[in-house]
C-alpha cells in the first residue's frame, strides 16, 4: 500500500524513497531478490504465512521484496497529494510481466461472462486486439465509440445494463486524443459502473486518474516509468484495497503474469528520476511540436499541447503538462514519411516510447499493421502518419536532426 506518502512535500522525494524498506543486510538499494521461494523457521510459520496470520513472502509468483518496492512506489506516485474526506487516498499496486499482463488481470478480475466493456476507439493496438481476439470468444464484448461525446457515452450506460466497465486511455495512441476522466467517472458512478484508465502516456507525474474518480489505473511500465528501455513491465493499481487484496491478487497469482526481481530493480531505479526526465521530455516536446507545426513540409501535427488539437481543453484541464508524445503527417504522404524516417541521423527508428532517446515509428506499417486499413483511417491513422516519442537529448539536436531530414 502507499502508506505514509504524505510525509513527502515533493514528487521526486517520494519517487526516490517510497516503497524502500530497510534491508536486513544493510544494502543501500533493495537487492535483486533472485529467489523463487522463501523458507520457514518451522512448519507452523509456513502455515501462518499461508493463512495470512503472519506477513511474509511465500513464492515469487505471488510476491517478492524487489517487486514490492516498485509496487509501493507506483501506488504512492498515483495517490500523491490526493486527499479525500480529509484523508490521504491509499492504493495497492500489483506488478506484472508486461502492460498486457496487467490489462489481462484487470479485465479478468472485474468481468464475467456476458459483461460488456465501453471504450473509446483510439486505444493501444494490443489492448484493442486483446478485446477482440481473446475476450470476444469468452462472451465479453466491447462497445467501441467516441467517448469524447458524453451524451453518447451516457446513452450506452443508460440503455445497456450489461456494460460493466468503462475502459479509457488518455492521451491515446497515436492520435493523442484525450477523454474527460472526471466527466466519464461521474457518469460511471451515476450508473453504477467501474472505470479504468491506461495512464502510460501521461505517467503519474503529469496525470493522476484517481484524482478524477477513476477506480483502476494500469501502466505499461516499459515506457516512461522505466524510462530507459531496459525492461518490459506493467502494473495494475486500485483504490479498492479489499478488491485488490482478494480478487485482483487471486487473478494475478493464477494468471501467472508476474514480473521478476531483475526487471523490477531496473524499473525502481528508472522511476527515481521520473520528475526530472518528464520535465525535459515535456520541454523538448513543446519545442518540437511548434517547430513541426510551423514547417512547410508538415501537413498536420497531433499534439494535445497545441491549441489546434481538438482535445486541447480536456488535456489542459486534467494534465499538468500535455506530455512528450505526438504524431504528425508529412505533406508527401507515405513516401515522404519513409524518406524522412530514413534520413534521420540521431533520432531512433523504432516502436515503443518513453526512453531517453527520441523514437519515431510508422504506425501504418508497424504497430497498427494488423488493423484493417479502413478501420485504421477511421481512427486517424493515415498512411503517412509518423509517431514520435520526444526524448531528453538537448532540444537543439532534435530540431537539427528533423530539419535536415525534412529537406
Ligand atoms: C506499450 C503499451 C501497452 C502494452 O504494454 P506492454 O508492456 O508492451 O505489454 C499498453 N498501453 C499502452 C498505452 C502502451 O503504450
Image (tube, grey):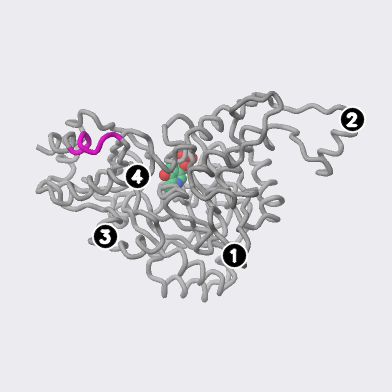
Of callouts 2 and 3, which one flags the residue occurring earlier in the amino acid sequence?
2
Measured along the vertical axis of the image, is residue 53 above or below residue 170? above
Front tag of 1 and 2:
1
Of callouts 1 and 4, which one flags the residue occurring earlier in the amino acid sequence?
1
Front tag of 4 and 3:
3
Q: Is residue 152 visible?
A: yes
Q: Position of residue 8 (x, y in %)?
A: 55, 48
Q: Which secondary structure dominates the residues rendered in magenta?
A: helix
Q: Which mark is residue 368?
A: 4
Q: Which mark is residue 96?
A: none
Which quadrant of the figure shows ligand 1?
Answer: top left
Mark 2 to mark 3: distance in Å? 63 Å
Q: Residue at x 23, y 61 (%)?
A: 308
CB-based contact (under 8 Å), mark 1 and mark 3: no
Mark 1 to mark 4: distance in Å? 40 Å
Q: Is residue 126 visible?
A: no
Q: Which residue is mark 3?
A: 309
Q: Which mark is residue 43?
A: 2
Amino acid at each position: 500500500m502507499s502508506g505514509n506518502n504524505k510525509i513527502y512535500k515533493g514528487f521526486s522525494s517520494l519517487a526516490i524513497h517510497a516503497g524502500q524498506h530497510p534491508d536486513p543486510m544493510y544494502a543501500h538499494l533493495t537487492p535483486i531478490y533472485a529467489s523463487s521461494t522463501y523458507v520457514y523457521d518451522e512448519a507452523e510459520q509456513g502455515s501462518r504465512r499461508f493463512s495470512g496470520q503472519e506477513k511474509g513472502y511465500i513464492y515469487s509468483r505471488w510476491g517478492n521484496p524487489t517487486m514490492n518496492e516498485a509496487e509501493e512506489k507506483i501506488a504512492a506516485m498515483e495517490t500523491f497529494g490526493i486527499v479525500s474526506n480529509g484523508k490521504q487516498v491509499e492504493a495497492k499496486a500489483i506488478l506484472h510481466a508486461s502492460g498486457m499482463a496487467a490489462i489481462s488481470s484487470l479485465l479478468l478480475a472485474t468481468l464475467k461472462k456476458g459483461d460488456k466493456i465501453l471504450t473509446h476507439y483510439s486505444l493501444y493496438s494490443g489492448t484493442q486486439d486483446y478485446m477482440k481476439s481473446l475476450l470476444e470468444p469468452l462472451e465479453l464484448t466491447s462497445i467501441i465509440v467516441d467517448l469524447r461525446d458524453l451524451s453518447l457515452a451516457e446513452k450506452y450506460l443508460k440503455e445497456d445494463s450489461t456494460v460493466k466497465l468503462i475502459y479509457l486511455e488518455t492521451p491515446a495512441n497515436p492520435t493523442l486524443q484525450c477523454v474527460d476522466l472526471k466527466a466519464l467517472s461521474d457518469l460511471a458512478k451515476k450508473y453504477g459502473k467501474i472505470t479504468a484508465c491506461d495512464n502510460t502516456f501521461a505517467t503519474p507525474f503529469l496525470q493522476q486518474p484517481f484524482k478524477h474518480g477513476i477506480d483502476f489505473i494500469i501502466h505499461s511500465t516499459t515506457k516512461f516509468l522505466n524510462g530507459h528501455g531496459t525492461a518490459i513491465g506493467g502494473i495494475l493499481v486500485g483504490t479498492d484495497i479489499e478488491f485488490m487484496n482478494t480478487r485482483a491478487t487471486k487473478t494475478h497469482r493464477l494468471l501467472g503474469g508476474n514480473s521478476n526481481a531483475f526487471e523490477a530493480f531496473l524499473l525502481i531505479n528508472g522511476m527515481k528520476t521520473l520528475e526530472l526526465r518528464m520535465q525535459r521530455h515535456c520541454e523538448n516536446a513543446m519545442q518540437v511540436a511548434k517547430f513541426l507545426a510551423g514547417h512547410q513540409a508538415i501537413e498536420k501535427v497531433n499534439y494535445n499541447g497545441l491549441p489546434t488539437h481538438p482535445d486541447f481543453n480536456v488535456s489542459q484541464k486534467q494534465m499538468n503538462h500535455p506530455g512528450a508524445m505526438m504524431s504528425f503527417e508529412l505533406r508527401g504522404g507515405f513516401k515522404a514519411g519513409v524518406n524522412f524516417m530514413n534520413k534521420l541521423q540521431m533520432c531512433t527508428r523504432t516502436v515503443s516510447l518513453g526512453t531517453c532517446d527520441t523514437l519515431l515509428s510508422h504506425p501504418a506499417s508497424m504497430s497498427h499493421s494488423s488493423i484493417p486499413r479502413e478501420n485504421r483511417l477511421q481512427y486517424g491513422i493515415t498512411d503517412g502518419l509518423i509517431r514520435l516519442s520526444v526524448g531528453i537529448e538537448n532540444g537543439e539536436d532534435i530540431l537539427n536532426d528533423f530539419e535536415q531530414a525534412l529537406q
